[in-house]
Amino acid sequence: MIRMLGRVGIYGAILALAALVAMPMYWLLVSALKTGDEIFTATPRWLPATLEWSNFVRAWEGAAFGRYFFNSVVVALAILLLQLTTASLAAFALARRRFRGRGIILLVVIGALIIPIQVTFLANFVTLERFGWIDSYWALIAPFTASAFGTFLLRQAFLAVPGMPRGSIAAPAWLFCGTFSCRCPGLRCSPSPSSPWLHTGTIISGR
């Protein structure tokens, strides 16, 4: 009986937390279907008197959301491909190659992780203005063509993949395998639990 009451209490707490988390989304949806007078009433109304579906039509016509969506897709895909290219090559060298200064470069990459992105805004703006890229796709893409976090993440993923002889002709396939977490029977590659390409896409989408 005590165990059952404990489970009921745990599930009740989980449901209460779930309701607390879902409440803003519920309020957002309900407010989207209200009239202007209902939104700004002193007493909150949990349900709209009438469902104003025309609000969505007016919102869509009031701004170029189609263009916004297209711009977001183009910028996100471009940054994703460029970061995977630059981060994969740099991470492969840092993970599996031996050369002078490798440790220093790795420290620089790790040190870049602690630099707030806000610090780079002014320098990036001045650089983009000199290149004449203001109000263009390149202004949104160029500052994010390389990622210290992506390089470090992929380096850790490569280190988790079984090694290979140096100078092997299978290096490109091994690099592809480690990046996209696929199975390569001939190279004895196993899926990386970090799925770096997925994490990279998620991070970029969040920007």
Image (spheres, helix red, strand yellow):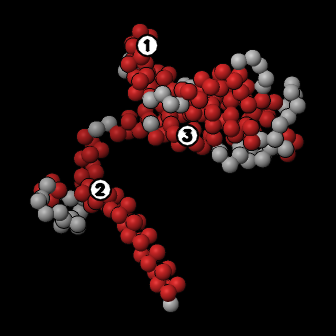
Q: Which residue is mark 2?
A: 28
The picture places residue 83, in percent across and down from the top left corner, at: 59, 29
Of all residues, the one furthest to the top in this rendering is 130
Occupied quadrant, residue 29:
bottom left
Q: Residue 148 appears in which quarter of the rendering?
A: top right
Q: Quadrant of residue 50?
A: bottom left
On the image, the x and y values in percent for residue 56 come to 28, 51
Residue drawn at (50%, 37%) of the image: 204
Q: Position of residue 203 (x, y in %)?
A: 51, 39
Left-right relation of 80 to 61: right
- Amino acid type assigned to the residue bearing label 3 in the image: Gly
Sequence-first disc among 1 and 3 = 1
- At horizontal 38% and vertical 60% (from top left) the residue drawn is 21
Pick the front one: 207 or 165: 165
User: What residue would you read off at disc 1?
Assistant: 127
Q: Nearer the viewer, residue 59 or 192?
A: 192
Can you name the residue that lies furthest to the bottom here? 1
Amino acid type, residue under disc 1 in the picture: Thr
Indicate left or right for 31 with 66 as reference.
Answer: left
Q: Which residue is mark 3?
A: 201
Query: What residue lies at 44% left-to-right and 70% top-to-bottom?
Result: 14
> At label 2, which amino acid type do we have?
Leu
